[in-house]
Image (tube, rainbow, N blue to C red):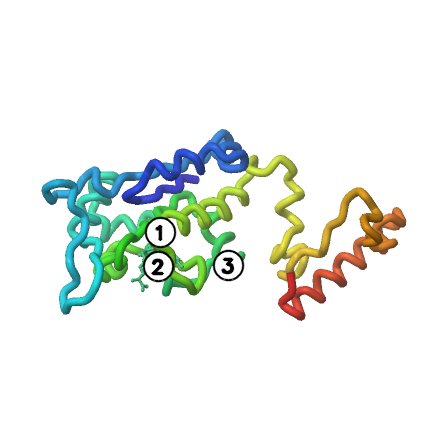
Amino acid sequence: MQLDVVTLFPQWFDWFSEQRHVANALAAGNELRALDLREHTPLSGGQVDDTPFGGGAGMVLRVDVMDHALRGFYGIDPVDLRRERRVIALTPGGRILDEALVNELAAEPAVTLLCGRYEGFDERIVQHFCSDAVSIGRYVLAGGELAAMVVCDAVLRKLPGALGHADSAAEESFSAALGGDPEYPHYTRPADYRGWNVPDVLLSGHHEEIRRWRRARSRERGATGGA
Ligand code: SAM
């Protein structure tokens, strides 16, 4: 899979790319590129934004700058690009990132994430260059870079080779194996710490009972919306 992030801060992704599961996914043949929005700007002094029509605070990322950037990176009109690959505007009001969307993206051969800054994108970027708009939650970050990392982290760990143990991703919160419920609680040594005991069933060695106990805890968490 090729994951591209268009950003004003490509260097943020140097650290991210070095993290174990990301590095594993890249070593397994996937690609993560941080593309500098300023690289192809047609404006002088590396300008990328401008004041909003109609007035108001802040600066808005210009549609012509994004047009030049995407043409520069991909060599085609961005209006056509979104038919070739998912081009996603990261924006607080977009479709909420959840397990279904992560699985959807992990099945794509190529995805481009656009990071906003300041007041966000000129709406024509979203309308004409993007296939989707995605939010990582109903709150506002200063920029799209952390949102892009959240998307990349969630997607890359789904890919073969990213995690050390293939089963870790098969049975985890919201997976089909758990019927979409959150994962059951885990415990490790010591079995008794300050009088806080690990449930007996987990020490019993009865695999079927353990499986049933875990499934029940998982369902409980799904029903209550708990941790
Ligand atoms: N004026 C925008 C609004 O009120 O919706 C907020 C812009 S925000 C300060 C700047 C950029 O950060 C956005 O364009 C987007 O790329 C990114 N961003 C902020 N919060 C986000 C979120 N919850 N999910 C995804 N991206 C987010």
| Residue placed under numbered mark 2 in the picture | 91
Residue 37 position (above or below residue 209): above
Mark 1 residue's CB less than 8 Å from ligand 1: yes
Dot 3: element: loop
Report the residue that reaches farthest toward the left.
44
When asked about the image quadrant of residue 164, the answer is top right
Find the distance from the CA under tag 1 to the CA under tag 3. 17 Å
Q: Nearer the viewer, mark 1 or mark 3?
A: 1
Q: How many marks?
A: 3
* Callout 3 amino acid: Asp
- Assess whether mark 2 and mark 3 are in contact (beta carbons under 8 angstroms): no
Residue 98: give its label.
Answer: 3
| Residue placed under numbered mark 1 in the picture | 144
Percent of width and height locating residue 65: 18, 48
Residue 42 position (above or below residue 137): above
Percent of width and height locating residue 78: 23, 49
Please state which of residues 31 and 225 is positioned toward the viewer in this rendering: 225
